[in-house]
Every structure is written in structure tokens, then in C-alpha cells.
Image: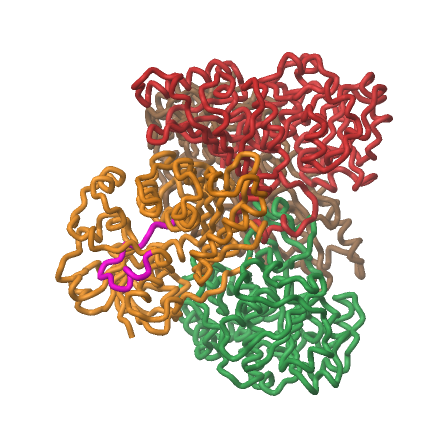
Chain colours: A orange, B green, C brown, D red
């Protein structure tokens, strides 16, 4: 059994990690870290865990934790993991960080967008960006995995094959993203009260959201050059789910002159199949079916599809995932499975819940 | 492997059966029956099943089905199961009926409340009322299980121990129930449109809801005499979940004269523990914690608790469950497990999802 | 023009007062009090008021306010109004208090249920309980109006005629109430976050909610004797609205022996008509129609109806209102209209919004 | 008093017309047309109107109606108004058509996108496109007003000044729109059931939504040439509200070389002010404030704002309105006010409701 410690176990992502690991046959959770609830029974914080989890919450002591477990998940605010990590810890345990601390390779960009000093820049290079379907082999050998952001996972996976193959003009890429409220975390803020969010939709962080440079960096690797793009998140009145709608101009020179819409469709579809055809957790939908967040809720799936607009020569790509699963805890477990060499889908076979 | 056929696989309860059985290690679904979608791929009706279920929908042919499977679930409108059942079928397969056809022993009461003629009254006696925690032994030997209604399961289990032990005056029992919208099914009716239900709460079927006689009959068995009670359902703007709030007068002669609130609490708690202490799927909560539907969502749990009011000598009992799981498909699978002698919780260990 | 000052203008009830008074032709708001947002533009707190309200928020200075306005609304937490009120203020302005400070005549009961020392018990006697349809004449002459609670208004009005006429056994009265989330106020608490409330229903304050003694006192006046009853509030995932479902045993001696259900109905209906037939804001619905919160949303109406159950000899009464309008700000304006002798419905003719 | 007839009074837009006209001091509704509910009391269809509207529903007889009223609103499916309109009717009454029949000047485009034969192409030329803030003077003299679509009103008004002034490259315009569910109407379809829509977001009609050519045509007039653009609608789990997020490249030659972000902001802001500075119902928000649908709910306002992205040289424009008010019934009343020469805001001064 893999012994697991969680730092930040009482946030929404931490809670989802616990839910998923309860169904994982090769792990046991040894440490429910939660600075805010030390000594409180975990199931008093999350009553759904009554008679399932009997442990009490512990402090965020990474050193001690490193002696007791095989893998640490940090589901904590930005900066915490970087402030605690060190060589001794990494020599003893694997670390899967759900925060942004090790996602961005350029420390200046991290410090500028997050407005925080990075406390462990020396580990940025070593950290592997844990987008499993893209970096699977590197992840297998990682000591430190930077688990991608929720918006990021959805945004990147939706466009990745087309950027990689150069079939879209990446400079035209615009990502309009919509998220459920759990992405905002469990902090008590007026802006996240029921009555403020319910029956309402708004954009926020327009041109300035922190997931922007992460998406640009990763898609830049695919494109083979630096990219800038627009990323606009919106808050939607639902608990879970991210939907991205992405716009880009198709490079017409990639198609035969006079290619019909259906011929273009087939070519693009074959590109998606090339990258995702064997991926269990990425479902490229049938022609004409638009992804919906409800169809992936509670599961580790990303649903992707696209429509080609001959009138404007643009492609509209769409992707949907559950922000707490594939966008956070599910992908973290998938990364753990890769790191420990067990079945990649262990603990992750939850069928989406409907309705 | 137990071969399963589902009649009514594209309703919400049918869909939940499929979701649950996907995680059941000793069954395989052989027949997705759905009169409305014959020959359509199941995953085109429920897109969450894309790349998970590859079958097409079939007709509701119970005779043919009886030759191919070991158990048939009927998740269909009232009257259908009764109109199809016969000795030949029951000699070949087990039948677990999620409709009301075989729940009520008095056929006149059934016909009066459901306003339908019963087509197979001869099987009512044989049918076992599938409330697992109450009728476990009878279920094990049943050919035909009448799976209880969603409101009913919650209403009965919440009060059962106190009615059985006679510690409440059953004639004072009032059940105020609140349900999510999936209980209303997937039929296209104006009353169930998003805009009609959202931001709204109402009572309906006041004094006339069909689950009333079912609750009265079952609690009557516990009381050892006929009961009448008030049951008032309400529609709540949420997908899943039933909460019941039940009121009854405590029989003061059951307590020592001058017993304190906490002494009464302990006595009542010990009664709940006597009946449910060993039950995996019934969680009697800690003192002071009120059940919430969110804490059981997606799982087979029923959460129960109570408060004693010394000012009025009443007890307020509360129970919460997921109407599609313990209130329908989950309990149906639990019944199947009992009938086939496998672990009662097989396929039912889903941890409640939060948020 | 009546000059208005609001203390607590940035809470939800305060915001609703502003919305309503914007449509009132005989008032102007002179003071937007909000301790938390002093010097901030009101429309930056409530962006819906952009280009409608241009004022900035002021302190809660009741003395100064008394010199500037004709009426003060206090939409503040319990205790504040009582701590600020004095003879000089009441000699200058009318005060309509939306908190509980002057609702309960027995100061000991107030202090016990609210766990707070009453700072101005001397004014409790003078204060008029502002349930307009019941206490209209006293309100007209009041200096200090205790505006009723949201649950209370709905609970009392629904049962009042039957209690007053003695046609129900008041000792059997049970009130099961359901409220939208705005009733919980705008404070930043985890329990009121979107993800905690959404897709969830729960009871809370079972046997201990503070509106209980207020309901008991007022219905006790109607009954002519002290009453105790059960009141159980529930939190429903919607912004606005309260629905109460009330249960009581009908006194069979009030009906002719062998009276049919419809005869009983007519008798009860005539009692409701006697009290509410001329009331603009109380709508007793047609036979068979259950009140729904959506049908009164945004308006000052209370919708009421009832069903008689011959099987149990009980009556089920139902009432619905918008907790921020008839349950708070609307009733406060109705009280102001009465106090100042203008049309009772001025500013209150908003038609319910649907959907 | 202006006598009003409504055809389609029991749809959501029709119901909103009734709600708004109840507060309009210069109209009275003479005819509640509703083919589906002929002879049924209007308040039995919309119970919020109980004791407010006492009329029964009538047939859709436009000829007869023309003799009885001064203005007819047609809130009906596409094709109906065109099939009924004729010279005699237009010689007697003004017609404000809320359907798409007379919105698109090119009948071929109408027939292609709506897949319907136009029955009265002869009146397309005469019809005035009722976007009040743009076509005010023409509307004043119109006999037949084509009331704009909900998505269209929001999409056009948000970009109009920048397209008109040529400061954005109109060929780069991308409109990502999000709508509440009432926009889908009151028809009983599975796709609009509560459980299908709730906790879900999806795009639909991608590249093919019927509002696309309407937006293109109107913005084309502003640009002075034909435009094609991408318009992608999404369904959001809320009753009311449309939010559009629009992306376009700023024409850098319109700014001084090296202009700072704030200088660009001021220039764009002054353009918005030029067009909308005196408009009561269009609010261009303060710097940094993003429109939210909740801030305009129930009102006739459109809230607009924008952010300039120096990294990509794009501008992100955002607009929010209530689809049933400014997006349908409110704008229809605004058009009626213009046509009849009364105050443009009569009946339309509803303050947005929050929460």
C-alpha cells in the first residue's frame, strides 16, 4: 500500500482527493493535514465522510510527514509548497503539488503574475508538469510533480493537437472559459456567497488571470515558440465543471484548395485521434455533439469536440472537465499512479454522474 | 457474472442503475430496454456513457429477456411490470420492480391511490417489499422484489425504530418531505422545466400523494396496527436528494418521571443503535448534527438524526438520502446482491460527493 | 416628501429597502448608513444601483440622523437599535426596526432566545408589532414599529384566522418552514458559500430558532392564551422566498356532524375571507392551488391556501412570501405608509416576477 | 390610454410584457392572446397574476384584434406574424413583432437561416429594426417594428460604437455569449428540463445560431460594409440574463504611437460616452468593473464595459442584459413608447433586483 499524506485536506480539492482515494485499492491516507482544523475530526468538517474517515486533522508538518508516507499531496495556496520543500523531503517522498508553485518554468513570470516571491526556485527545473497525456514519460520518473491548474488542463488539452501540428494560427487563439464555483475554493468571501453567485454570470480576471501564462507556456512548447493569447474566465452558478470555448483561425494552406467542410473535419478529427485515440480519459466526441460539463461530472474525463466555420475560416474547439477531478484531485491521483508505476486509471474509473 | 436486463434504462432511475452497475464486479448488463429509444445507442441518450456503454437500446420484451438474463430490473411507470409478469418469467429470472406495482399488499388501496387496475394481483402476496434493512431475510429468498419508493424509503427508515418500539404516539406522526427534481422523472412537462422549478419551492399532492399508503402500510406492520398519517411532499430546486422532517409526540410513559432531555436523548439514541448500529448504509449522526442531502449525494447512505423538544413533548426526526441511489437504483442493487447471495455492499461503496 | 434614513443599508434587507423606495413617490433617501462601507459609493457595493443611487455610505449615527430625516429604518443585527434608541430620537423621528429588538414583549424571553442583554427595555411596551394586516390601527399611531421577522410574518399570517376563530386545536400546531438563502444575510460565512448551499437542503435551529417565541407570542394573542408550538426552519437553494407548511388538528366540534370535506372547506375558506378578503397583499388562492414562492417573488404578496385531510382530521395550511419584501423591507415600507398616513400600497405595487 | 393586444401572452416574453405593462401608466391590455390556453384565465397560467389580471386567454385573431386595440405585440414563434400581417391591419394598428420575421432585410438570408418561407416579404422594407438607441428616429414613425433578438441586442450594443468608429478590426470580431434558460421559451422539451440544465453549461448552435446574420447585418450597417463574425451561444443554469464577451483586434493606427494602456482606455471610453452618454438604459461601467447579469436582472438596463489587452492588442468588450426585458418585452415597450410619442422610459423604471 502506498502511504499518502495530504496537506490542505479540508479545501475542496483536498476533500476530492480523499473521496477519490477512498476508492483507490493501493493507497491508504495516513495524514489529513489542515492547519485550520487541527485536532478536529475530519468527518466533522466534511460530514459526507462520517463513518468513512475516522481520523483527525493534523498540522502541515512536511518534515514529519516525509518520514511517515510515500507521497505528499499539497492542496494548498500558492507559495506554501515552495516554502516547505527541500532536498531531504524529496529524498524521502514523492511530492505532487496542486498549487501553482512549480508549474511555470520562468520564475520571473511566476513572481509577476502571482505577486509572490518564489522560495524554492532551485526545484522548478526538476519539477515535471503533470499533464499526464502530454508528459507521461517524464512524470513516471519525477520526484516533484507540478499538477496543472483546472482551467489550464482544459484549455491546453482542447487545443494541444492542433497547436502541435500547426494547423491553426496560434496567434489567433482566444480561450473563453466558464467555471463552476468550487474552483474559487472554500474561503469565506462575500463574492462567493450563494446569493452573490446564484442566478448570475460574470467574467473576472479579464486579461490578468494567473492561469494565462501557464497555458501560454505549455502551448508554446507544443508550438515550438512563444505564444500570447487571450484567456477570459467566467463564473457560472454551478458547483463543478469547466467548459472552454476556443477560437482560432485555421491555416488554409494545411488543406487542399477547395476542401469541403467535411474534408476539413476529417483531417482535424484524425489529428485529434492521433493524439488522443488511445487515451482513456480524453473523449473526442462524435460529429456535432458539443461537450457539456454535466456529462463529465464526478469523473476524470475531458470531453472535447470542434466545429469548423467556413464563413470565417475559424475553428471553434470546446472542452469540458470536472475542475475538482481531472482539473485537480483526479489528475493528481493519475500522476501518483504514473509515479508509482501502477495502473494509470486505478481509483479513477468513476462513471460521470447524471443528473 | 450475473446477467442483467433493464427495462426502462433511459429514465433517471434506469440511468442510475447503469452508472452503479458499471462499478459492480459481478454483473454485466445484457439488455438496455427503452421503448422510446429503440435502436439508438445508449450513450447518445446519456452522453456521460460515451466510450463506457456501447450498446443500443432494445424493446421492453420481458419474455425474450427472461431467456437471456438472470435478473430483470423494471424501472418503468406504474402498471407495466404487473402487465408483463407471469409464472414462466418468474421461473427463469429474478425480477426487481422499481415501480409501485407490488409494493402495496392491499390491491384495493393500490387501485384507489394509483387509479389503475392491477393486472397481476396474484403475485402481490409473493412479492417481498425490498427495504433491505427491515426485510433482509425475506429478500434473500425472493423471486419478485418490490423496490420501495424514494420518499417511502426515507420516511420509513427515519421513524421505523421508534414506531416499532412504541416510544412515539404513531397517530401523531406527520412527515414533511422535500425532494430534488429528478424524482419527477425525465418526461417533458412544462411543470418540470428549468425556469418553472428553479428559484421556487412548493408543496404538491397534499393529502393525496401515492407514497402515503405505502408508508402507512409499512409503518403499520412495525406498529402492529393500522396507521394513518400526514405526508406532504415538496419540490426543491436541486437535482437529487430527499430530506424528511418527521414530527411525533413522545410517549412520556416510556421515560422515567422527570427524565432530562439528555436522558431521553440517550434512550432514543440507543433504540436507533439497536436497529441500525450494524447497518452500513444507515448512519445515525452525532448529537446536534442535522442531516443534509448533500452529505449523501451519489451514495447509498441514509443519514438520520433527531431532536427532542421538551417544550412540546415532541420529537423531530430527520432523514436524508439520494433519491436515485438509496431511493431507487442503489437499493435495487442492494436487493439484487441479497437475492444472489453476494456481498450486500458490492457496487455500492460510492463515497458521497461534495460539493 | 418623507425624508428617509437607513441604518444597515448594505445588508440584503437594506438593499431591498433602497430598491423599493426608488419606486416610492413620496420619499427620498437621505442617509445610506453602513458601518462597513463608510465613504464608499453605495453603487459600488450594489452595482445594480449604478447611475440610480449616487450617494456614499455613512456611519450609523442615529442622533445626527434624527435631525435630518423623518423616519429611520434599522436593518441591523439584533441589539443595535435597542442600544441607540432614546427619547430624544423618538421625539424627532419615527423608527421602524427590522431587527428583533422590540418584537417580543417579554424581555426575559428575548434575552433567553437571543442570548443578549436588552439595552432599552423601557421602549418594548410602546413599540407596535408591525404586522400590518393584524395591527393596522396601532401602527398608524406608532413612534416605534417592530417590523416582524420573515419566517414570523409568513407563519403567523398563514394560521392567524384559524387560531383566532378557534377552529384548530392550537396545541397541535406544527410549522415546517423553508427559506431561501438571502434570509441568512450577507455575512461571509463558509456555511453560506455557494457550494455549501447549492444542491442541498437541511433543517437548522431545530427546536431552538429565534423566531419561535415571536410566533408563539403573536398567535397566543390571537388564541387568547399562551401557546407552544414546533417551528422548524430549512435552508433551500434559492435566493428568495419563504414557504411554510403548517399542520394542525381541526376541532371537529366546530363543524356539523358528518360535514363533508367540501363543506368544511367552505367554512374555513369563509373564515380566511373574513380576515383577508379585503387585504390587497394577502391572496387566499383558489381551491386546490398550492402557494409557490416563485409566484410572489419580488412582490409584497403573501399567498395562502389550505387542504383538509379527512383521514387524519388535520388541516394543512400553506403560505408563501418573499422574505426580503413582505418578510422585511416591503412590510417596513407598508408600516411607514401607515405611520405617515399615505396610501398603504404606495411603492409596493410590484408585480411578482416570473420566471 | 393606449389599448394593447398581445399575441402569445403565455410565453415567457409575453408574460414579461404583461408584468411590465401592469406598471405602465398609459396603457391597458385588452387582449391576452394564447392559442394554447383559449378560455382559460390568464392567472391560472401565470399564478403570479392572481388578483392582478382577471382576463381569460383569447385566440390569435389579428384581424379582430386590429379593430379593438392601438398596438399589437406578437410574442410568437417565427413565421406567425408574417403570415397574419396585411395592409388593413397596419392601417389600423401599430405592430411590434418580437419574432424574427422582419428583422433581417435580406429575405434569402432569413429563409436560409430560419428554414422557413417568408409569407410577407413586402413588409420587410417598411419594418424598422427596433434597437431603440440606434434607430430611435425611424422607430418614432414606424407602423411595424421588428423588435431585436435577445442575444442580438446585447451583442450589437456592446460593440456598436467601436465598429461605427472603425477603431476595431471588425473582421476579427468574435462573440461568445451566455444565456439564462428563459431564452429557450416555455415549450415542454427534455433538453430544457430542470435536471438537464441545472449544474451544467454547454455551447449550442455553434456556427449556426439564427441570431448570427441579424448581428452581422446590423453591425454591417455600422461598419459600412458586409461583416462575418463568430457568434457562439451557451446555456447557463439561471432563469434570466445574457452576458456577451466580445473579442476584437484594436486598430493600432487609431492610437498615437506608444499610447499607454490608460490612454487607449480613455479614447475608447470617450467613444462609448459619445454614443451612450445620454442613454438612460445603457450604462457604461466604471473602469475595472465587469458587467454581471445579476446587476441588471428585472430591469431594462444594458451594462457594458471593456478591457484592453496590450499583450495581444485585443479589446475584450462585455455586455449584460435581462433577456426578457431589454432583450424582449422591455425593449418592445420602449419601442411602443417611441411610436406613441410618450416618455421613452414609461413603465421601464424598474430597479434591478438583487439578490
Residue C101 visible in the picture: no
For the point 69% across and 82% down, the residue is B67
Residue D131 visible in the picture: yes
Q: Is A162 situated above or below A300? A: above
Q: Is C201 situated above or below A230? A: below
Q: Nearer the viewer, residue C70 or A154?
A: A154
Position of the C terminus of chain C, as image quadrant, is top right
Q: Is residue B162 left or right of residue B105?
A: left
Q: Nearer the viewer, residue B230 or A151?
A: A151
Name the image quarter holding residue C254.
bottom right
Q: Position of residue A268 (x, y in %)?
A: 50, 49
For the point 70% across and 18% down, the residue is D26
The span shown in magenta is A135-150
For the point 73% across and 79% down, the residue is B63
Q: Position of residue C231 (x, y in %)?
A: 52, 54
Q: Position of residue C120 (x, y in %)?
A: 37, 36
Q: Is residue A246 left or right of residue D228?
A: left
Q: Is residue B257 left or right of residue A10?
A: right
Q: Position of residue A211 (x, y in %)?
A: 34, 43
In the image, is residue B303 part of the stretch drawn in magenta?
no
For the point 79% across and 57% down, the residue is C256
In the image, is residue A141 part of the stretch drawn in magenta?
yes
Q: Is A291 situated above or below B319? A: above
- The total of numbered circles placed on residues is 0
Q: Nearer the viewer, residue B285 or A104?
A: A104
Amino acid at each position: 500500500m502506498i502511504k499518502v499524506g495530504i496537506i490542505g485536506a479540508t479545501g475542496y480539492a483536498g476533500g476530492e482527493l480523499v473521496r477519490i482515494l477512498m476508492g483507490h485499492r493501493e493507497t491508504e491516507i495516513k495524514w489529513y493535514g489542515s492547519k485550520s482544523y487541527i485536532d478536529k475530526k475530519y468527518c466533522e468538517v466534511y460530514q459526507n465522510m462520517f463513518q468513512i474517515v475516522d481520523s483527525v486533522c493534523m498540522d502541515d508538518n512536511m518534515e514529519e510527514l516525509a518520514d511517515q508516507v510515500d507521497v505528499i499531496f499539497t492542496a494548498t495556496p500558492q507559495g506554501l509548497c515552495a516554502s516547505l520543500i527541500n532536498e531531504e523531503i524529496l529524498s524521502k517522498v514523492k511530492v505532487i503539488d496542486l498549487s501553482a508553485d512549480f508549474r511555470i518554468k520562468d520564475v520571473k513570470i511566476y513572481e509577476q503574475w502571482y505577486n509572490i516571491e518564489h522560495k524554492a526556485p532551485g526545484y522548478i527545473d526538476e519539477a515535471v508538469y503533470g499533464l499526464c497525456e502530454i508528459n507521461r514519460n517524464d512524470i513516471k520518473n519525477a520526484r516533484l510533480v507540478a499538477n496543472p491548474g483546472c482551467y489550464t488542463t482544459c484549455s491546453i488539452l482542447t487545443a494541444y493537437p492542433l497547436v502541435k501540428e500547426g494547423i491553426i494560427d496560434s496567434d489567433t487563439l482566444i480561450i473563453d472559459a466558464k467555471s463552476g464555483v468550487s474552483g474559487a475554493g472554500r474561503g469565506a468571501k462575500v463574492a462567493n456567497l450563494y446569493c452573490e453567485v446564484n442566478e448570475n454570470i460574470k467574467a473576472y480576471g479579464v486579461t490578468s488571470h494567473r492561469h494565462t501564462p501557464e497555458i501560454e507556456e505549455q502551448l508554446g512548447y507544443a508550438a515550438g515558440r512563444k505564444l500570447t493569447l487571450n484567456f477570459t474566465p467566467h463564473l457560472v452558478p454551478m458547483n463543478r465543471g469547466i467548459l472552454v470555448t476556443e477560437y482560432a483561425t485555421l491555416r488554409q494552406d494545411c488543406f487542399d484548395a477547395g476542401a469541403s467542410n467535411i474534408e476539413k473535419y476529417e483531417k482535424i478529427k484524425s489529428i485529434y485521434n492521433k493524439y488522443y485515440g488511445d487515451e482513456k480519459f480524453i473523449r473526442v466526441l462524435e460529429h456535432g455533439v458539443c461537450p457539456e460539463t454535466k456529462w463529465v461530472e464526478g469523473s476524470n474525463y475531458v470531453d472535447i469536440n470542434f466545429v469548423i466555420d467556413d464563413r470565417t475560416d475559424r475553428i471553434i474547439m470546446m472542452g469540458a472537465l470536472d475542475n475538482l477531478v481531472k482539473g485537480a484531485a483526479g489528475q493528481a491521483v493519475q500522476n501518483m499512479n504514473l509515479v508509482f508505476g501502477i495502473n494509470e486509471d486505478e481509483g479513477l474509473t468513476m462513471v460521470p454522474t447524471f443528473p
